[in-house]
Image (cartoon, grey):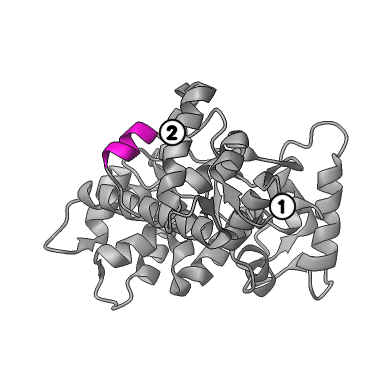
Amino acid sequence: MKASSIYVVLGILSVSYCSAIPKPGEDDHKNRVHDKKLSESLHEEEGEHNNDYDHEAFLGREEAKTFDQLTPEESKERLAILVDKIDKNKDGEITEEELREWIQYVQKRYITTDTDRMWKDHDIQGDTLVWEAYKKRTYGFEDDHNDENSPNFSYKDMINRDERRWKAADKNKDGKLDKTEFSDFLHPEEAEHMRDIVVQETMEDIDKDKDGYISLEEYIGDMWPNKDGEEPEWVKSEREQFNTYRDKNSDGKMDHEEVKDWIIPPDYDHTDAESKHLIYESDTNKDGKLSKEEIIEHYDTFVGSQATDFGEALTRHDEF
């Protein structure tokens, strides 16, 4: 079975929530979010499995950057220390449940850390953040985006979209976000009540003719935008996926509910799928669990030449 039929990895265009504004028109089709996103990387890229996804899901997105600078020996040494942390019952073997809990922990740690960082970066009034303060800090201007002659007019849609997401995250509708609501704003894929916003933003990104639907051509164009050379096999397979599974009513396009089923499938658990995948790739003796030796032997699956800023992670004494 093709990996893309298992790992749903496309979703909405990630907005850069920082003081530096992303450039309009940048090719961000690979920076999308989906239900319980484990990694900024696609699990499959051009039909091939992308190990960066595994590294980030297992290690954490921020931490996964600095293993580039480690030798294989250093990677294995530090991975061995990590295995001891994952092995909660200290029986020398990592079960699927222990691996799943670790991946969930890494994901939650990333969201908490990211929210804390962004929270401190803004002008908090008491224990809440107001929209105008966020907008000014993020975009660096206030009202000139309403002027079509302004050089910042190209950001108008981005600001409007942010404001719409802001209002959706504001559960008590008091016009302000507390820290929990702000986390939902930054990571809408993690909040049940934000799912429709995720779908809406996805459709806006991919629906180039703005007819309110995603056609087959738009679906393919989002994943294969340059269309250089002969169409690869994985693109042909995606065409079949669209016609067979995505377009449920066979009208040649995806509506809101069909897009929702695509990017937020109700019966799919990304954490569960990733833990099963890692065990499948590394379980040499096929006993359904991983020994430290098996993990170290397949270290490239977990960390490869890329991994966490592991020294920093360990010196923080993160408890699991």
**SS type, badge 1:** loop
Q: Amino acid at mark 1?
A: Lys
Is residue 1 visible in the rendered structure shown here? Answer: yes
Is residue 13 visible in the rendered structure shown here? Answer: no
Q: Answer with mark 2 or mark 1, whichever residue precedes in sequence.
A: 2
Q: Which residues are magenta?
A: 310-316
Residue at point 66%, 40% (across, down) = 50
Position of 277 with respect to 31 (left or right) is: right
* 10 Å crowding of disc 2: few (<14), some (14-19), many (20+): many
Measuring from the top left, give residue 222's x and y in whole percent.
69, 48
* 19 in relation to 93, above or below: above
Magenta stretch holds residue 5 = no
Measuring from the top left, give residue 308's x and y in whole percent.
43, 36
Q: Which residue is mark 2?
A: 78
* 196 in relation to 12, above or below: below
Q: Which residue is mark 1?
A: 286
